[in-house]
Amino acid sequence: VKRAYKLKDGQMIESVLMPYDDGRRTACISSQAGCAMGCVFCATGQMGFARQLTSVEILEQVQRFHVELLSRGERLSNVVLMGMGEPLGNYNNVMEAVRRINQDIGIGARHITISTVGLVPRIRRLADENMQIKLAVSLHAATDEERNAIMPVNLRFPLSELMETCKFYVEKTGRRISFEWALIAGQNDSPEVANKLGHLLKDLNKMCHVNLIPLNPTAGFDGKPTKQADCEAFVKILAKYGVTATTRVRRGIDIDAGCGQLKSKLNKVVGRGGAPL
């Protein structure tokens, strides 16, 4: 279920409710209107940054799904801040919203995930919060040269600094980090790249997991998703380094559920918008 909300100032954001066969109900929510990080494969990154969301605007995305599920005799089980925007770029509002999602709505801290492209000082700050939330780092490349080309944030916080900070986070919190890896056919899905990634992550002493996501195609990026056989080969190579990985099923292609895709589509339709938030 994908929702586009038109805010009071005309900005538009997105949220997704993802039901799973095992009973989980996960809300994927936005933290910013647009995004300043400029990741070339991301629809939100392609549209640029508009403004920060308030803590209430972040919270209400979760509240709406929570109430809707309760009316059907179901409950929201997980929240992931992996929608539009860089959550750690809106740190104070995100953390206030996360605390209210935990305390007011009753989602356990271990069932809340914050994603980041790798804002090193904010990851260190998050480690000091003493909260049991999960951290997911969008990685997508295993060398600075390759990551610079698709994720401009790497020019400011190169991989050596990011990996050092991830190790600090793991040691400080005792919690495992997830690394997100959008598999792009012919670009970052080869055995050579898998070996580079294994070398990069092996020093985290098995305190990490890689989520492999075949690319969600966007109009502004001509990359294609990796084939299933190549995904499986990638997983096997990582296992040789003691790094666990799973291939996530691509969900919501038919409803433009990838980050920023629905907004991009709606912006082309004159006079259309979401419900006021």
Image (spheres, helix red, strand yellow):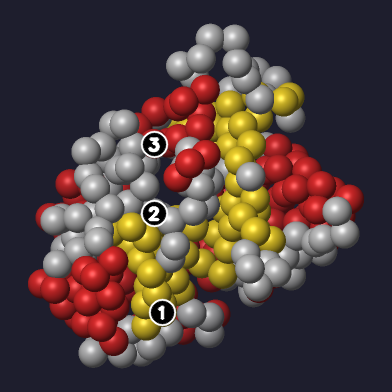
Left or right, 239 with respect to 67, comes to left
Using the image, determine if residue 56 lies above or below residue 194. above
Residue carrying label 2: 117
Using the image, determine if residue 42 lies above or below residue 190. above
Q: Residue at x 64, y 36 (%)?
A: 3
Q: Depth check: give the residue in front, 230 or 246.
A: 230
Q: Give, as a three-letter code, the residue at label 1.
A: Cys
Q: Whole-percent x and y of residue 115?
A: 49, 57
> What is the C-alpha distance between the residues marked 3 and 1?
27 Å
Q: Residue at x 15, y 55 (%)?
A: 187
Residue carrying label 1: 208
Residue carrying label 3: 43
On the image, which quarter does residue 226 sit in?
bottom left
Location of the C terminus (image quadrant): top right
Mark 3 Cα within 10 Å, few/some/many (few <14, many 20+)?
many
Q: Give, as a three-letter code, the residue at label 3.
A: Ala
Image marks 3 and 1: residues in contact by CB distance under 8 Å: no
Q: How many marks?
A: 3
Q: Residue at x 58, y 26 (%)?
A: 12
Dot label at residue 84: none
> What is the C-alpha distance between the residues marked 2 and 3?
15 Å
| Whether residue 139 is visible | no
| Whether residue 86 is visible | yes
On the image, which quarter does residue 158 sit in?
bottom left
Q: Secondary structure at mark 3?
A: helix
Q: Give, as a three-letter code, the residue at label 2.
A: Val
Left or right, 196 with respect to 66, comes to left
Q: Whole-percent x and y of residue 93?
A: 65, 45
Q: Whole-percent x and y of residue 4?
A: 61, 32
Location of the N terminus (image quadrant): top right
Q: Depth check: give the residue in front, 54 or 225.
A: 225
Look at discs 2 and 3 and give the one toward the viewer. Answer: 3
